[in-house]
Image (cartoon, rainbow, N blue to C red):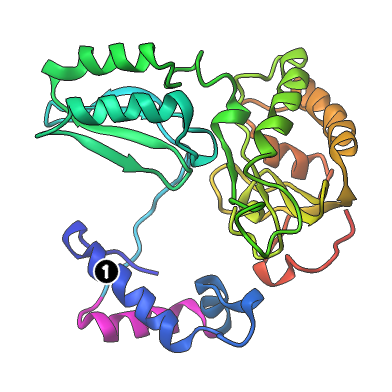
Amino acid sequence: IGFCEPKDAKYVAEAIMVTQRDFGDRTNRKHARVKYTTEDYGPAWYREQVEKVLGKKLGEPKPFKFESRGDLYGWHQTEDGLWHCGCLVPIGRVKDHWRQGLCKIAEELKGGGGFRMTCNQQVMIADVPAAKKDTIQKLLDQFKIAHTAETTVSGLRRNMVACVALPTCPLAFAEAERYLPTLVGKLEGVLERCGLQERDIVIRMTGCPNSCGRPSMAEIGFIGKAPGTYNMYLGGDFVGQRLNTLFAESVTEDQIIERLTPLFKKYSTDREKNEAFGDFLVRTKVVKPMVAGRYWWTIPEV
């Protein structure tokens, strides 16, 4: 809706939330997000309200392009000379050797450096001085904390997200956090046979329609309906600018693998250069593109 200087970003974010607080739909959870308020009132109106709260005008929008929404794994250095290492923590659950290793790393980083949680349920070891980089690397290796292309196993595993679901959440109808790594492991065998193991594909699972695992934004999404049973959604785009579409209802693990296997095979042979899996499914008419969020809860003709 507009452009702001980096120094104003947190104040603009606050103004966006205040506008949603005052005008968002609190009567219907399925219609409660910022995107629906923007759609109902229009982008120009939403910008006007944000500017009122902010107390200043936003600049005109500038062109931009998202190419990825995943996390950076491995070591990366910023202009300040500090190092940062992205690590895979499956479904964000720090346990076993991950917990031991990260505790040791935290001890080494006292007085400088720390951890950052990413929106994809991963961990970044941040602001590591060059003098401590080798020590941190030895701990990563010692405790087998995945952080490279080899140790993160596959593009599917690097891009999996799930809500906590059972047994923690009383709203869950089905497993998510505890089950998705198992399903991904079985799909990795299919992907390896298709030559797609390193291909980044976003897969997400949530235990109920409240969708805390954000499955609607995935190229492959699942919403729990009953123990071991899910609605399956396909066709979201990799960068998160198109929702997916309902593909199959009430499917089990065997049915999920049965339906995805021929799609992976076709994707391996018929995709265009740099074409993401979700875009391929839409282009080849496996599913119709989801053109507006208000249609996502309907049952489409796929």
Going by the numbered disc 1, the residue's amino acid type is: Gly
Quadrant of the rendered image containing residue 283:
top right
Identify whether 123 is placed above or below 218: above
- Whether residue 47 appears in this view of the structure is yes
Q: Which residues are magenta?
A: 41-57
- Judging depth in this view, the residue of 189 and 96 nearest the camera is 96
Identify whether 188 is placed above or below 13: above
x then y, percent, for residue 200: 59, 29
Residue tagged 1: 59
x then y, percent, for residue 125: 29, 31
Q: Counting other residues with Cα less than 10 Å from the Cα at mark 1, is it few (<14), some (14-19), or many (20 or more)? A: few
Q: Residue at x 33, y 34 (%)?
A: 124
Q: Which element is circle 1 on?
A: loop
Identify whether 48 is placed above or below 5: below
Identify whether 172 is placed above or below 260: below
**Residue 219 within the segment the image draws in magenta:** no
Is 50 displayed left or right of 226 in the figure? left
Secondary structure of the magenta portion, mostly?
helix
Q: Quadrant of the N terminus?
A: bottom left
Is 145 displayed left or right of 136 in the figure? right
Is 239 displayed left or right of 19 in the figure? right
Q: Residue at x 70, y 25 (%)?
A: 185
Q: Residue at x 73, y 37 (%)?
A: 280
- Whether residue 288 appears in this view of the structure is no
Q: Residue at x 58, y 83 (%)?
A: 40
Is 41 displayed left or right of 215 in the figure? left
